[in-house]
Image (cartoon, grey):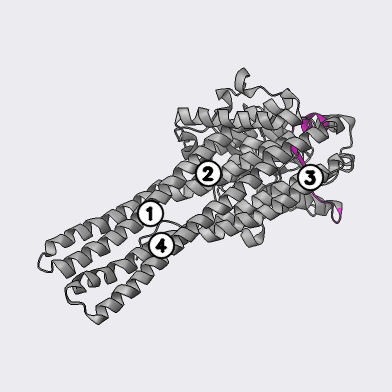
Amino acid sequence: MVNIRHSGPLSDSSAQAIPARIVIGVTGHRKLDNIPSLTNDIQAALEKVRQMVPPLPHTPLLLTILSPLAEGTDRLVVREVLKFPKAVLEVVLPLEQDIYMQDFETTESKTEFEELISQANSIKILPSKGQRNQAYERVGRYIIDQCDVLIALWDGEQAAGRGGTQEIVQYARDTKCPLIWIQTKKPKQVTLELGRGLNTKSLHNLDVYNSEALNTVRYKKQLKKLGEFFEDANDSAKLPFDRLHSTLEYFLHRYVRTDILALRYQHLHYRAETLVYTLASGAVIIAALQTIFMPQRRIILIFEVVLMLAILAIVGVNRWQRWHNKWIDYRFLAERFRSALFMALANIDIETLRPPRHLSLAYSPKDWMVTAFFSVWNQRPRLERADSSLFERLRSFVGEAWIQDQIRYHDSTRKRHYKRYSRMTVASYTMFGLTICVTLLLIINLGRLETFLAFAATVFPAIAASITAIRTQRDYLRNSMRSAEMLGHLEEIRGKIIAAQDSSSFYYLLKEAEEIMLHENEDWRVVVRFHKPEVPV
């Protein structure tokens, strides 16, 4: 039994700021002369990378080197990067490892490769297609597509064959990838080609996230609640303490922090939105009161002006403080941390986040919350793949603590959103019906009631419009239907997970479940990101 409640294992050290992850790609020649001089140039290049990063008072810097560990340039740059504190090596291979190692002629080279790859946080093997040189070209392009800046050790001459250094450098220039060119034939010639530059907006957003203050009482209360939930879920699964504890220790603080922040900004955005439409109705009411009941007292209209200015101020503050953007970004990151906890427990890697084309408006792989997630993911505690003795325990825990929990959440969300949609629809139709009634009575001309009826005929449509606008902005019906659709998918995947007879099937289904939840989050972002604060005109 994982005694989270009483042993207090979830220390505050797990709540540290998320580092800014700068991915350095590398390309260059395999045969190099004057290694000491080039090493100095590489150090100068790395200093240029650090200088490209804007001041981040709340955010540590984490350098990540992405490389296939080819002889020469790759290994030289990798070793220099790994000298930095907490630097991370990510390896991407053009071919299967045993085939790729055939390129290394000496035993010393193969030993060096194995020594370096043993330090890798992740190893990705690209699909094998075509000739060997095509594989090298693909891996070079992949590195540029994934990195923030490329360091190239190049003599400036044409490539000897396909996938050579010159072609990769040209691809970096074509895609405007920031490039630091170290001229191998001219010592101390290190040239920066800025290209599109680093994504400073993304870095700033991460620094803002790291600077967010939390209500300590609420944070600890939520942390305790979730700790007890996972403990209860593990009562029947009985996963080993060390395995579950190390993963919870790492991910749970980050999830709770991000979830609280997402809820904070959702509430701020919703309150601002409700207040804007309420004030808009109030402005109509004041105008109607003055026009119908006090036509001589125009000074009253100053209150309408005040309400309209208040609307502009609320919308302006919402945009300036980025309540809407923070809400959807923090929610995305929180859901990624939730899924990551279970994927890490099963020791299943998470691929680079890239939405499918029909959801490409959701986010970009370079967005701050994506890079922040992988900064956390790549430093997670490493676990062994669960063996057959753990397979059934892991299946039981995941089925209850993740899939079944999400089923309960979406069932509750479906009902809650539909109830709100129904209530607001009834309210808006009621106001619409009352407008028809008072207008008909106004036509009949009831004498003394004529003034009141004229007021009601003016005000009721404004109130109905405000209710409808709030209902539309909140997308209650669509969100209810989305949760209903997710229920079906989750019930199906849960049934498959329970029925899984072997670990390989289970791991495949776990990746499928993670993908389902990611796509649901992406779809939600596409819908909600365009519900930005607007003046109701």
Q: Work out how far the residue at label 1 is from the one at label 3, CA to CA, in angstroms.
A: 42 Å
Q: From the viewer's perspective, is 40 left or right of 534? A: right
- Secondary structure beneath label 4: helix
Q: Which residue is mark 2?
A: 330
Amino acid at pointer 2: Tyr
Residue 238, how many percent across, how many down? 75, 28
- Secondary structure beneath label 1: helix
Q: What residue is at 34 percent from the left and 53 percent from the top? A: 275
Foreground of the two, 352 or 525: 525
Count residues near mark 4 (Cα–Cα under 10 Å), then give few for <14, some for 14-19, many for 20+.
some
Start and end of the magenta stretch?
A: 114-131
Residue 256, how many percent across, how many down? 55, 35
Residue 249 visible in the snapshot: yes
Question: Marks 2 and 4: CB-CB under 8 Å?
Answer: no
Q: Is residue 128 magenta?
A: yes
Q: Work out how far the residue at label 4 is from the one at label 1, CA to CA, in angstroms.
A: 15 Å
Q: From the viewer's perspective, is 444 left or right of 526? A: left
Amino acid at pointer 4: Ala
